[in-house]
């Protein structure tokens, strides 16, 4: 039996998906879009790059979709078959059939999905924020499947979420343009203050975020956990931890200190001039680092 629709109404569904399809027109270059069936529902994916190139799977952050990877995809897709996903438990064109209630649910969903996208071969896995936490959970369960792992500004995973983030995120869940703007401007402060083009980019994301909150029912995500020292050391090699110097959801300096102390096998790097918006405000730097990581094989 299908689970109830995640949308507030059929009108809200139609409004959001029409806008989403409009935003998708900005995706760089041709894309192979499809729905991949899993036991949790149909997952919407965007494929870019040569079909026979090494596969690279990209996970979005909470409240984001596959479209957040648009600045990074053109360069990544030159030598990789890039698969950008809409999470089965979040906004976008994925169609959930049952809820995701635990971290293991995410692992099972991602394993079923990648068995279709990268059958019988290792793949690179990169995630941002909540998607990075999901990526770490998958890597602990199936390290043999991965050619490399990139954790970009991960929620949980290395450090607990700061209280300043938590209470702002709770307010942002209310369908209010004021709280949406306040939260996203705080979270992406470097983007908000860099230049006019960056400010316009942020405005687009605020508009998209507010429409999603208005269109979807309130939801409760699985809380991102902090990994133990042993779990951090067990992440496969190579693993990259990338964080902006102005990260808002946890202390970047404390995260780097912890990793260097308990898991020196993880490549930990600080990106100047960026916070939680690191993949956007420092897109070229992040993309170059991902190419270096996933090009080793």
Image: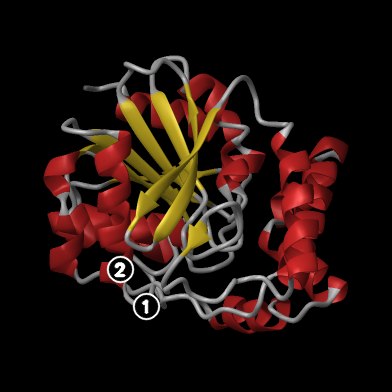
In this picture, residue 16 sits left or right of residue 159: right
Q: Residue 200 — which label? A: none
**Pointer 2 residue:** 105
Residue 292, x across and y down, in percent: 36, 25
Residue in front for this viewpoint, 271 or 202: 202
Residue at point 13% right, 66% down?
Answer: 230
Q: Looking at the image, what colour scheme do you see?
A: secondary structure
Q: In the picture, which quadrant includes the C terminus?
A: top left
Q: Report x, y in % for residue 34.
A: 49, 37
- Mark pair 1, 2: CA separation: 6 Å
The residue under the point 34% across, 65% down is: 157
Q: Give 35 or 198, whichever is nearer the viewer.
A: 35
252 relative to 202 in the view: left or right: left
User: What kind of element bears circle 1?
Assistant: loop
Which structural element holds mark 2? helix
Q: Which residue is mark 1?
A: 101
Which image quadrant: the N terminus? bottom left
Residue 76 placed where, x, y %?
A: 47, 24
Q: Is residue 266 above or below residue 1?
A: above
209 or 128: nearer the viewer: 209
Give the number of callouts: 2
Camera sees residue 9: yes
User: Of all residues shown, which one is farthest toward the front?
Assistant: 1
Q: Is residue 206 visible?
A: no
Proximity of marks 1 and 2: CB atoms separated by less than 8 Å: yes
């Amino acid at each position: 039996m299908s689970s109830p629709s995640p949308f507030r109404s059929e009108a809200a569904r139609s409004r959001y998906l029409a806008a989403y399809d409009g935003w998708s027109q900005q995706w760089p270059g041709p894309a192979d879009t499809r729905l991949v069936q899993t036991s949790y529902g149909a997952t919407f994916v965007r494929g870019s790059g040569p079909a026979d190139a090494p596969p690279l799977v990209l996970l979005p952050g909470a409240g984001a979709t596959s479209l957040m990877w648009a600045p990074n995809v053109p360069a990544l897709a030159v030598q990789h078959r890039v698969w950008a996903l809409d999470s089965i438990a979040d906004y976008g064109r994925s169609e959930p059939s049952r809820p995701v209630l635990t971290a293991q649910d995410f692992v099972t969903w991602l394993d079923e999905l990648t068995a279709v996208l990268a059958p019988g071969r290792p793949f690179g896995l990169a995630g941002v924020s909540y998607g990075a936490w999901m990526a770490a959970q998958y890597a602990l369960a199936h390290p043999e499947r991965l050619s490399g792992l990139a954790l970009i500004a991960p929620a949980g995973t290395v450090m607990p979420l700061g209280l300043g983030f938590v209470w702002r995120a709770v307010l942002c869940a209310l369908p209010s343009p004021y709280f949406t703007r306040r939260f996203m401007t705080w979270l992406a402060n470097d983007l908000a203050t860099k230049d006019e083009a960056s400010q316009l980019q942020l405005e687009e994301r605020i508009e998209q975020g507010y429409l999603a909150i208005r269109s979807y029912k309130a939801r409760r995500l699985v809380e991102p956990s902090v990994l133990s020292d042993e779990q951090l050391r067990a992440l496969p090699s190579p693993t990259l931890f990338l964080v902006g110097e102005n990260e808002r959801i946890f202390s970047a300096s404390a995260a780097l200190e912890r990793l260097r102390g308990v898991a020196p096998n993880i490549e930990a790097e600080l990106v100047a001039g960026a916070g939680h918006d690191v993949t956007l405000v420092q897109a070229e730097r992040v993309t170059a680092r991902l190419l270096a990581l996933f090009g080793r094989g």
